[in-house]
Every structure is written in structure tokens, then in C-alpha cells.
């Protein structure tokens, strides 16, 4: 018997619904792993934009992270601390717009923190525009320096768009890793002012219709002979959240599949953002060495051991094709960010 396209489509949709429900149940169970440290969520207003993040030992990045997103108009931060030892938790407890939970369990076993954040999004995010980012990611978008997130969200609402995609853009110094081009109090884009403007490629993968965007400096330096192992650079950081939604693979993809259709990578003319990625600040060498022991950042840590070994050696990422960051208009001109609603 021949199976028609309508039947295949219905079967695929059923499987994606089943997967989504399974992941949501994981998130609900993961709520038991969260210990409230300070809970200010009762003060959240219905129109506020919420920021969700999970972290461990991020004091080097936290002050700029909070300042950047406060400037953008985030109303409340909901953060999971995965057993920090550098004072990140004590610092966050003192921030009046931060609600903080502690999770002592395995970051890898929690789907790299997404089960923990999914529990918070299910309880607190429904109906809000929710920004889900890592602490080493600073979102920029067209006119971000003059147009706060509430205005951007209103524009997306008016266009009927439930989410906005973004490309993660790795920034790096001129010299070897372990150094920076400016002091610790300088903005991220002064400390790590360089990036690879190309090449990048994006493909769609059924049945979730998730996109896989690859390329850039980490592929060029660490995976030149096996580019398919390079990092996935597309994300869906900004979503008008519904408790039926769930992230699947970090914020690279989500369910239901229609959310993944909101971004096609560089060259997509639709309104999108760029996540300026501060992974390669001076602590990157020590963090890579630590990860060799902790083994928490990949499904198969042994497969990526050479990657962390290479970072721990402090290589120079700069090359003659590198471009110095000059603002959001430059990213639009390079085709790395779209402007059309």
C-alpha cells in the first residue's frame, strides 16, 4: 500500500506533538531540582519582557550582561545557577530584578540547562515575550540602541510573528586566546572586536524544520577537516511564549516546528538579530581546561576533547579576513541580520 503525502504529514505532526509533550514533562519534573534562592516573580507585570538564563561561574560577564539587557528593556531576569563557586550567586542575590534558583545537578543531564529553564518558562513565561540567552551572548538587532525590546515585540506582534531568530557571532581578540584587546571594564566589543564575516551556510532539517547554521571562526580553526562537527550558530532567543512551547536543542530549535520557520540564517531579509558571543574572553583557556574534567557541554564529550584541548592551548583566531565590529548597520550590510518585519 502506498502512503500518501497527507498521511505522512499527519504521522510526522503526531510524532512532533508526542516529542513536544515528552520534553514538557521533562521540564515539569526538572522543577524539583530547582531550589529557590530569591524569588521575585510575584512582582512580574503582565506586559514585561522576561530574560531566562542558566549559568555557572560567570562573574566576568554578568555586570555587562545585566546592564545590556536592562538597557534593552528586560523587566525581570529568571536565572538558574548551576553551583557557581566564583560569587556569581551572591552577586545575583543582590540584584532587585533577578529571581534566582540553584541547581546542583548535571548540566548535561538537564539537556544543557534547558529542562531547568523550561520549568521556569512553563510557570512564569506564558503570554510574555521571553528572551532566553547564555550569559556570554549580547543580543543586538536593527536600531537596538534606539528601539527597546518592548517596541520590537510590538512590531513582531503586529506582523503576527511568534519569534525572532538570531545568529550567534563569535568575537575574538587580535592576539592569542587568554588575552583581550582592552581592559576588563571595557565593553565586550572592545575586548573582543574581531569576527569572521563569512562563509556561513544554513540548511533545514525535517521533520522539525529546524535550521542548522554553520561556519565562522570556530569551524575555520577547530573543525577545518570536519566542518559538520562545527557549532550550530542559529538560535531562537526571543519568543512570545506559550506553555505548549519547548526548546529542543538549546535555543537552536523549538517545538512546535512553525517556530523554527521564523529564521533562515544569513541572507534572510526578515527582521532578525545577532548574538554577540563573548566565549573567548581571557578566561576561555582556563574554562576549556576545566571542561576537559567536567565533561558537561557536549552529548559525547570524548568526541570534542580535541576541541577543548585546542582552546586550552590559547591559539590565535585572527586572520587577514577578520573584520572589526563596527555596529549593527555593519551586520545588516554584511547580510548577517535582516530588517523586514
Image (spheres, rainbow, N blue to C red):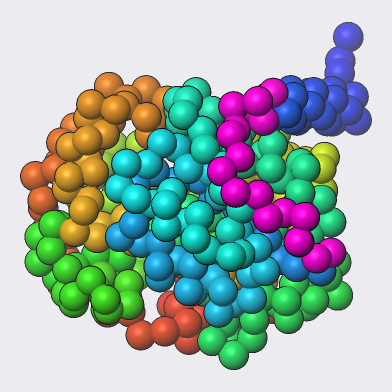
Quarter of the image for residue 158 reads: bottom right
> Is residue 187 among the parts visible in the rendering?
yes
Q: Which residue shows up at 76% across the image and 61% down it?
A: 44
Residue that sits furthest to the top in the current view: 1
Quadrant of the rendering where the C terminus is positioned: bottom right
- Asked whether, in this view, residue 161 is left or right of residue 52, the answer is right
Image height check: is 114 above or below 47? Answer: above
Q: Does 45 lie within the magenta span?
A: yes
Q: Which residue shows up at 40% across the image and 67% down it?
A: 63
> Is residue 322 among the parts visible in the rendering?
no
In the image, residue 230 lies at what x, y percent? 35, 43
- Asked whether, in this view, residue 244 is left or right of residue 22, the answer is right
- Asked whether, in this view, residue 223 is left or right of residue 330, the answer is left
Quadrant of the rendering where the N terminus is positioned: top right
Q: Which residues are magenta?
A: 29-46
In the image, residue 26 lies at what x, y percent? 68, 24
Q: Which residue shows up at 34% across the image and 57% down it?
A: 59
In terms of depth relative to the viewer, which is nearer, 100 or 48? 100
In the image, residue 178 lies at what x, y percent? 13, 57
Image height check: is 196 above or below 288? Answer: below
Image height check: is 92 above or below 326? Answer: above
Q: Does 51 lie within the magenta span?
A: no
- Asked whether, in this view, residue 36 is left or right of residue 219, the answer is right
Amino acid at each position: 500500500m502506498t502512503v500518501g503525502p497527507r498521511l505522512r504529514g499527519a504521522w510526522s505532526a503526531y510524532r512532533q506533538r508526542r516529542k513536544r509533550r515528552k520534553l514538557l514533562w521533562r521540564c515539569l519534573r526538572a522543577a524539583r531540582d530547582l531550589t529557590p534562592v530569591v524569588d521575585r516573580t510575584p512582582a512580574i507585570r503582565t506586559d514585561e519582557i522576561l530574560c531566562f538564563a542558566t549559568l555557572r561561574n560567570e562573574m566576568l560577564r554578568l555586570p555587562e550582561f545585566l546592564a545590556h539587557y536592562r538597557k534593552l528593556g528586560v523587566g525581570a531576569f529568571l536565572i538558574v545557577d548551576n553551583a557557581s563557586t566564583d560569587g556569581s550567586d551572591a552577586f545575583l542575590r543582590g540584584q532587585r530584578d533577578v529571581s534566582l534558583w540553584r541547581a546542583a545537578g548535571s548540566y548535561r543531564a538537564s539537556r544543557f540547562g534547558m529542562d531547568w529553564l523550561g520549568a521556569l518558562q512553563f510557570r512564569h513565561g506564558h503570554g510574555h515575550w521571553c528572551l532566553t540567552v547564555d550569559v556570554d551572548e549580547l543580543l543586538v538587532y536593527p536600531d537596538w540602541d534606539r528601539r527597546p525590546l518592548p517596541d520590537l515585540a510590538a512590531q513582531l506582534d503586529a506582523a503576527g510573528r511568534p519569534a525572532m531568530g538570531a545568529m550567534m557571532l563569535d568575537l575574538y581578540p587580535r592576539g592569542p586566546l587568554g588575552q583581550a584587546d582592552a581592559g576588563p571594564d571595557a565593553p565586550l566589543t572592545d575586548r573582543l572586536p574581531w569576527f569572521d564575516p563569512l562563509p556561513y551556510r544554513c540548511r533545514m532539517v525535517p521533520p522539525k524544520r529546524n535550521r542548522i547554521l554553520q561556519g565562522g571562526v570556530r569551524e575555520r580553526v577547530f573543525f577545518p577537516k570536519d566542518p559538520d562537527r562545527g557549532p550550530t550558530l542559529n538560535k531562537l532567543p526571543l519568543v512570545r511564549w506559550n506553555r505548549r512551547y519547548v526548546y529542543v536543542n538549546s535555543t537552536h530549535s523549538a517545538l512546535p516546528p512553525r517556530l523554527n520557520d521564523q529564521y533562515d540564517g544569513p541572507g534572510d531579509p526578515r527582521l532578525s538579530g545577532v548574538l554577540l558571543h563573548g566565549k573567548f574572553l581571557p578566561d576561555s583557556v582556563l574554562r576549556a581546561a576545566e571542561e576537559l574534567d567536567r565533561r558537561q557541554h557536549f552529548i559525547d564529550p570524548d568526541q570534542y576533547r580535541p576541541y577543548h584541548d585546542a582552546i586550552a592551548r590559547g591559539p590565535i583566531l585572527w586572520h587577514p579576513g577578520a573584520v572589526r565590529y563596527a555596529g549593527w548597520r555593519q551586520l545588516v550590510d554584511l547580510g548577517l541580520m535582516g530588517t523586514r518585519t
